[in-house]
Each structure stands twice: as C-alpha cells, then as structure tokens.
Image: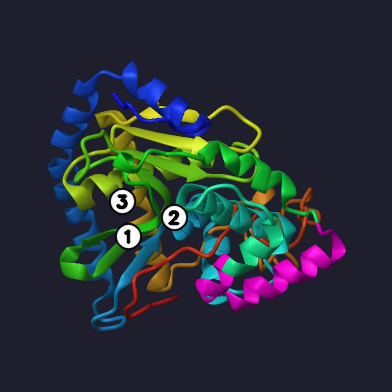
Amino acid sequence: MHGEVGGALFDEVVAELEVLDPALAVSATGALPGLRDRLEQRASAAAALLDGHEEGAVLRVPKSRLADLQQCERLAVARHARPDAGPPGLAALRGVALDRFVLLEVAQGPIVDPVEELLSVLDVQGELDTCDQVVAAASADPGFVDDLAAAAAAWRGVPRSWWPRLQSPAVAQLADGRVVCSGKLDVELGGVLTPHPGVVVEVKSGAPRPAHVEEVALYALLVGWRDGVAPSLVARWYPDEPTACMPVDTGLLTSAAARLGDAIEQWAQLVVGRRPEESPGPWCRWCPHAAVCPSAAATAGPTPGGLADPDDEVEWEPPGDEVGP
Ligand code: SF4
C-alpha cells in the first residue's frame, strides 16, 4: 500500500488499513447524502425555533459544545457564557503541547528543546497567552512536557504522499447556513487528492474515554460531508496506549448524525429559553457553576492540574454571528 518509510503511528495505521474491507467505506460514502437530508430536516426545525427570538441568528454546534451537551446542559450553557473562565490547567496545557509536538514531528523532524520549540510554534500561531502559561509551567518544572515530546517521535517520517494535514477544519452548514456544526481535526492523512484512503487521527494526552469514540465518529461524518467521501479509518492516538483504530462504516456515521441532530435540537431549545437540565458527573470538576449548582456531584473535587477539562482545548469555530441563551 505504501513503499515509503514511516514512523510507528503510521505503521499501525497502515496495518489496520491493509486488513480493512474497502466495501465499508464505499457503503459509508453512499449513506452520506441520506444522513445529510435527515439532519437538514432536524436543523431546519431547530432554526425555526429561533425565528422570533433573534432574527438571522446562527445556531452553532461545534464539537466541544456537543460534548458538553452530552454531559450536562447547564455545563454547556455555563461554558458558552464564560468560554474563557478559569486557567487551562496543567493537563489541558499538556494537551495543547502534544498537538504542537505532533505538528513539529510531522513537519520537520526531531524535537531537540521541547519548551523552546513549543513556544516558537505557539508564538507563530499567535497563542501568546498560552506562551505565558507555558513559561510559567516550565519555570516550576522545566521538563513538564519532555515525556510528550518523546512520545511524539511516533509521528516521525509520515510519507509525504499521504499529505499529512494538521488542525484542519471540517464544517457542515445546514438549514441554509442557520445551523453550523464544526470540528478541528488534529491530523488527517490520505483521502481525496491523494492515492491513499482517508484517515483521521485524534491526538489525546489524557486517558482513553468513551466520549473520544464519539468525537472521531463526528469527525468522520463532517469529513465525509466536506469531501464527499467518507474516510476509511478513524483513530485515537494516546502517548502511552496502543493506537485505537476504527473502520468507518454506515453504522458509525448514522450514530454520529443522530447525536448531532439531538445536540442541535437541545441547543436550539436552550437558546430560546428552556431551562437547562443538570446532570452531575465527573465533569462537575471543571464546571464554571460547580460552586453554585445544587446538583454538583458530591465527589467533585479539584481537577488534576487546574480547572479546565483535562482534554479541553478551545474549539475552532468558523467566524460569524453568534447566539446564546
Ligand atoms: S455542577 Fe455538575 S450538575 Fe451542576 S451544572 Fe455543573 S456539570 Fe452540571
């Protein structure tokens, strides 16, 4: 399938692709238009709810909001109202660092000075606040991301013919642009414009969680609609775990579309004033309302490394009008 030399991650992905039934991706691609039609109907009904509330408003459901809604509606509303509440926390900062180390390994090769090279990338990307947080964390522990930089070596040598793309957006505009669903993909390999099957890889610095499976399923759906072809494989890469690969089939895309439709309807109802439900869980630890919410989980203690969701990174959203409850 390839004749070029790649790194450990790439070898794992290629091994999965070599045993994959190509018919799965073909039938998944065939299901994309029908799934889109059904979601268009749900999105149009959700957009109609906004009429009379705020004319011309755009309902936005990025991946991060969908994840919040699945945990707790009140949490989703609280984070929307205060998107930058609290420091990112050490765990979230390490997640940002790992994404940048993967970028460095894919783009240029070995990382020699992790903190300095991380600061260089963040500076180029205009992430100056994050630079300050990295400097503060490094002053307390100069080696705080050394393990992540070492793990990112697994990404070394991905062949150019697979056209690795990092932090690329995938957006679905529904209901004549009144509803926008978006995600930012950590890594894409292959796909249209290359001779190889499409692969989407989510980079995670924390421990595996069931919600990560739903994240990559959503990405498969958004990429399928964006490119007109479903990716063949979605994968989750963790520094200390085997790469978790899943073939993209019709069932995976159907489940993702159903969850997205549910989230669109939920968010529309909340935007027009429905009282958000409270659903306590481990996520109470990073909820902006944890101190005042009567339902806050009794077990909610301090979040390791800070206030933010250990996996959280500010989710990219396309520019445009915003609405909120
Ligand atoms: S504290 Fe827990 S239950 Fe209350 S709003 Fe936050 S996440 Fe929901």
Q: Identify the mark nearer the N-term, 1 or 3.
A: 1
- Magenta stretch, main secondary structure, is helix
Label 1, label 3: how far apart the Cα atoms are: 10 Å
Q: Residue at label 2? A: 66
Q: Quadrant of the N terminus?
A: top left
Q: Is residue 315 above or below residue 207?
A: below
* Residue 85 visible in the shown view: no
Q: Is residue 60 magenta?
A: no
- On the rendered structure, is 140 left or right of 323? right
Q: Nearer the viewer, residue 324 or 97?
A: 97
Residue 267 lies, in percent from the top left, at: 40, 63
Kind of residue indicated by mark 2: Leu
Q: Nearer the viewer, residue 208 or 11?
A: 11
Label 3, label 2: how far apart the Cα atoms are: 10 Å
Callout 3 secondary element: helix
Residue 264 lies, in percent from the top left, at: 34, 58
Q: Residue at label 1? A: 181
Please report the residue visible at 43 percent of the width from the left and 65 percent of the height from the top.
316
Residue 8 lies, in percent from the top left, at: 52, 30
- On the rendered structure, is 291 left or right of 42? right
Most distant residue in the top direction = 19
Q: Is mark 3 within 8 Å of ligand 1?
A: no
Instruction: State the mark number for residue 261.
Output: 3
Q: Cβ–Cβ below 8 Å for labels 2 and 1?
A: yes
Q: Nearer the viewer, residue 137 or 36?
A: 137
Question: Which span is picked out in magenta?
Answer: 121-142
- On the rendered structure, is 221 left or right of 69? left
Kind of residue indicated by mark 3: Gly
